[in-house]
Amino acid sequence: MAMDKETRRALMVKGLERYRKERDFFKFLSDTLALMPDEEMQLSKEVTDITVDRYDTIIRCAEEDKPFVAGYFNAAPEVYTAMDLPWYLIMQTPFLAASAPYLMEDVDAAEAMGLGTDWCTACRLSLYYIEAGLSPPPTCMIGLLHPCDAATMLHQAVVRNEKWRGIPMFCTDPPYFEDQRGIDYFANELKKMVAFIEENTGRKLDLDRLREVVKESNKQYELWAEYAQLRRAVPCPQGWGMGGPQCFAVSQIFQVGQPRGTDWFRRLVSITEKKVKEGRGVIPKEKIRYFWFDLLPFGWCFELMPWLEQEWGAVMVMEMFGFTPYTPVDTRNEDTIFKGLAKRNLYESPMVRQARGIADYFASDIARVVKDYKVDCVIWPGHMGHKDGSASTGIMREICNELKVPYLHIGLDLFDRRYTTPEECKDKLSKFFGAMGLG
Amino acid sequence: MATKIKSRALQEFQEATQCLVNPALQKWKDQGGRVIGCYCSYVPVEVITAAGFVPFRMRGTGSTGTDLADTCVSSINCSFVRHSLDLGLRGEYSFLDGVLWVNSCDHVRRIYDHWKRKIDTSYLRLLALPKKNEQAQIDWYRDEIRFLRESMGPHFGVWISDDRLWDAIKLHNQTRRLQRQLYELKKRKNPPITGAETLAVMVAGTAMPPEYYNGLLKELVDELSQSKDGHADHRARIMLIGGILDDPAYIEVIESQGALVVTDSLCFGTRNMWGEVDEKAGDPFTALAQYYLYDRPQCARIFGDQPRRSAFIKEMIRQFDVDGVIAERLVMCDNWTGEQFMTGEDLKEAGIPYIRLDRDYVNIGAGQLRTRVQAFLEMMGR
Ligand code: SF4
Ligand code: SF4
């Protein structure tokens, strides 16, 4: 049964309250970055500016009763751009505003609500935001059944929620192995997703417009690939503060197939190229080149990552979001476009690429990165939500042994610093570097 | 709750839950029979039976530690996974001629990766199980089952014809029918069999040659049907729901407090036998995919199916006259965390008493379990 107008209005008022706070948080970040003339800071500022614009667009749609979607990156977000449909991620708060002052209170409130504490904190928080009415109700939703169990359960719980029950949701089903059969199947799932969005928003997908968008996103991925190559340089031109997460956010969420995003990539490549030519690294003396094989600890990266650079001269040359070997989508016809998008979103998109299928996929990535990026050690942070990754720790260790590169498994919560505190992480890292004779 | 029945069949079932290789299975092996391990109840066992082999549902029975598995997986992985992998690494599963998986959860799917690398079993295969159950997914799974036949045949040098598959379907349907007859008896005011005993019957059914099992089960059902004895000394009729639970001792503790488990939604319970594979369908692969992925009650991991799962629970509550629901899950299991939360909300709306329990695969935690169950019964006014 569709959600009635009155319920929708009440939910919207409350949902937008938190949403505006988040927007203001990014606005504050943008204003702070504006005071820093450094080129890279300005590049970061462009990302926060785009984020603020996006928040504003959703708020406007909500106020003017125009359609907007709650969607996901690894389900062909090119479609939203082509349909001119604003969208947001219900999981965005833990990922984007993780350093927001209220995050810890939210984590506690989620626990009080009875959401199991061994369940990924990002999922727990996202469900809490909906149960507590802190997310603006979209016109319709695209959920996520990969890469992890937690995401599957989150989206089931969202459609079950008493108030959100009236919001239609569609999820694409992810095949497990990488092969042509999987691509064909997933392409069909994407087509069904388009039909679902059309039916629920009244918008139509124009194939020519989609082609244009995909051509533009191809350019973004080409530039991303070029950038990823530049990071192989010794010393590494950028560390944890710039790279994969931003490239991912721009190409898959904020500026999918849009020229402003492509320009951002061009600036990134040009700034980085200059640094590489000049032999400038992110820190004056690079001593350890590490591969961080997970997402960043969004909730508390400022407490750990700079310390690694300052204390140990340790530079994050690559991380999970950054290593995504994208193939250009063939834009000849509808069939090639959808199959290309299927491949990109299933087998190449970060997180899904590493966590969705068999271990061989991420195992080959680790081997590639270690060789290509002259990595001194591999760190598997082991986010408490990443059960598949933690269930693979032995395989990761063995690959590293074969490559003769030290391996460390920490075990932490990317969003909640209390799980393994930054101090405990630093201690583990120091002991590891010391024992391995690094730094 | 003391057992009321003296049954040879029941005793054999109970013994089969205490070990991996029960005497019937050992006899099968001694005669040169092959056995294929199955990780998760979504593996279509009919294909294995049609090949002339015995399907064996993977367990961690008898495991006392996880030292070897802990070099592969981590402490945030579920204890079933750690114990069963540990047994595999110790060679306790060397009686298997092959192992089949589905990508049932983030923990189990990684056992496949470790097994492939570390354990010498000649035939391993993972079937890609969809996470939704609309027509396209049923078609996908139909093809997965067909590919399984095509891969098993040449590997083992057997041909699994459609006719043999239909025969296997009929055989396993017979098992399901007998198991449902057993559950029918539990609808009685004073059920003749406890929840712990029932679980033993169900677990044994995943570890014995099916014809042999069916014969024994028929004997038990006949005995119980004729018996006038029943359990009258219970304080409440309980439904138990959750994921992998293969240890009757866990239910024994619950029942020791007077909470008689009369029905369940477990993958060693009703979810494995409610309904039957359609013997009149056009082809056996479609029939199997339809049953496994849609017709029978589904597991937590199937998106879009939660309202049906919830409706199934409510229907069981009605049919078995259930007073309260206990949901158990293994710590670290994401699928059942989500499911427990949703079921809890649904049952709250329906006004049905409900409690969530966390457990470890090997260590039952009897003391704490007793306290929680007692408190639950008191809360229900029993
Ligand atoms: S477990 Fe990882 S992939 Fe899954 S929702 Fe949490 S952060 Fe995302
Ligand atoms: S209990 Fe949960 S985590 Fe463990 S095997 Fe079952 S579904 Fe997977």
Image (tube, rainbow, N blue to C red):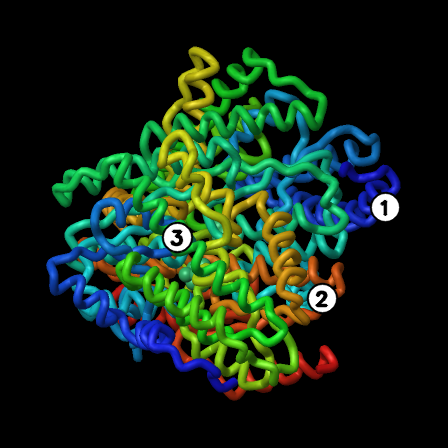
Check disc 2 and report the residue beneath it: B352
Reply above or below: B223 against B139.
Answer: below
Residues A367 and B145: in front is B145
Can you say which quadrant of the picture contains the N terminus of chain A?
Answer: top right
Secondary structure of the residue carrying tag 1 is helix
Q: Which mark is residue B174?
A: 3
Q: Place residue B166 in its image quadrant.
A: top left
Could you tell me which residue is drawn at 22 percent across and 59 percent down? A398
Could you tell me which residue is drawn at 66 percent across and 46 percent down? A159
Can you say which quadrant of the picture contains the C terminus of chain A?
Answer: bottom left
Residues B45 and B129: in front is B45
Mark 3 packing: few (<14 Cα in 10 Å), some, or many (20+)?
some
Could you tell me which residue is drawn at 45 percent across and 60 percent down? B179
Amino acid, disc 1: Ala
Q: Kindly tell me whether residue A48 is visible in this rendering.
A: yes
Q: Chain of mark 3?
A: B
Toward the front, the furthest residue is B226
Q: Are discs 1 and 2 located on one and the same chain?
A: no
Reply above or below: A14 against B346.
Answer: above
Q: Chain of mark 2?
A: B
Q: Place residue B129 in its image quadrant.
A: top left
Amino acid, disc 2: Ile
Could you tell me which residue is drawn at 52 percent across and 47 percent down? B302
Check disc 1 and report the residue beneath it: A10
Secondary structure of the residue carrying tag 2 is loop
Q: Residue A290: x and y, percent? A: 33, 55
Amino acid, disc 3: Gln
Q: Chain of mark 1?
A: A
Residues B368 and B292: in front is B292
